[in-house]
Amino acid sequence: MLFDTSKANIEELHDELFAEKQVSVSVLRLDKIHPLVSGNKLFKLHYFLEESINSSHPAGSGGKTVLTFGGAYSNHLSATAYACKVLQLKSVGIVRGEKPEQLSHTLQQCLQDGMQLQFISRQQYIQKDDPAFINSLKATYGECVIIPEGGYHPLGAKGAALIMDLVKDKSYTHICTATGTATTLAGILMAARSEQTVVGFPVLKGITDIKNNIIKLTEKVAEFENLLVLNNYHFGGYAKKTDLLIQFMNQCWLKHQLPLDFVYTAKMLFGTFDAVKNDTFTRGSKILCLHTGGLQGNKSLPLNTLLF
Ligand SMILES: *Cc1c(COP(=O)(O)O)cnc(C)c1O
């Protein structure tokens, strides 16, 4: 890895529910790698960053510029900005929507980390993967390493697979992860043993193409038989939340000293508790939940919503 991942430990959660159901639930704390930068995002960036480092910049200084895309609250943008700062690479963020008067915390962080931001209209953003648009970006910023939004690319999945290198204990029966683009899920599936069930918790509403996405991301034709997708924990859709979810986050903090983000990890862990409750995870299951980070996103919540 290009980053120090030694702080990412595995912690077991002790809860009456788990004792009653005779399961164990542990959390891989990827959030501890960095206080703000999303844990899984650094992994998804790995091979793109390597490509940039290994190619020399046309102007002769350092690696190629890294260019990527995201919205105003994107964990991916903030992780890219941070990673490029650490590795002394130039970074450019193409941001969805007109420039607002007040920049989000996320975008302020990106600027502080030296990322150059370009705002484009939503109509233009939809066409961001068109060759003509990509060429116009190259004309502006020079030859660069272009990372699709959210790292959604086989190289992103290959990077996410490195997460499993941190899991030395191979006896987990289930690996749970929050799912957006499914790039992380695809990587975990590639690295997991076939007898381990990999459980995705989509945070978007009405997701039906996960299996196709995984085929694209893993470049594997056959479906993974050890994939389980639990679709009922999106809480209304992407970045939507309810009082119940916020209560759950505060409870997890008080009881387990576990900080969660409301967009991804809270939904995944809520889903894990619920799946234990309703016996989706059977007795004897040894469950590992990935804390994929994302805590910077909580800064967009009103003050005093969370106890941490
Ligand atoms: C982006 C993100 C995810 C989802 O990852 P995908 O690879 O897009 O599915 C999960 N958790 C956090 C905290 C994230 O920032």
Image (cartoon, rainbow, N blue to C red):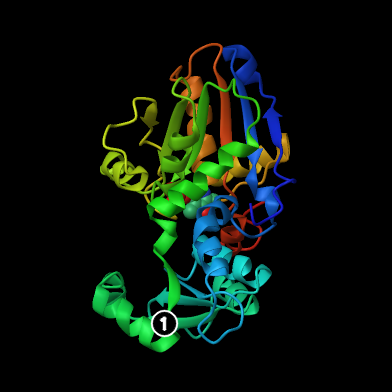
Quadrant for residue 220, please give it.
Answer: top left
Residue neighbourhood size for the residue with mark 1, other residues' Cα within 10 Å, grouped as few (<14), some (14–19), many (≥20): some
Residue 58 point in image, percent of width and height: 50, 83
Q: Nearer the viewer, residue 143 or 308?
A: 143
Q: Label 1, on which residue?
A: 119
The structure residue drawn at horizontal position 61% and vertical position 55%, both measured from the top left corner, is 295
Ligand 1 within 8 Å, label 1 CB:
no
Quadrant for residue 115, please give it.
Answer: bottom right
Q: Is residue 171 above or below residue 62?
A: above
The type of residue carrying mark 1 is Phe
Residue 30 falls left or right of residue 235: right
Q: Is residue 114 above or below residue 16?
A: below
Q: Would you say residue 42 is visible in this rendering? A: yes
Residue 4 point in image, percent of width and height: 71, 53
Residue 305 point in image, percent of width and height: 62, 55
Residue 109 falls left or right of residue 120: right
The structure residue drawn at horizontal position 58% and vertical position 70%, both measured from the top left corner, is 81
The structure residue drawn at horizontal position 68% and vertical position 68%, both measured from the top left corner, is 86
Residue 72 point in image, percent of width and height: 47, 71
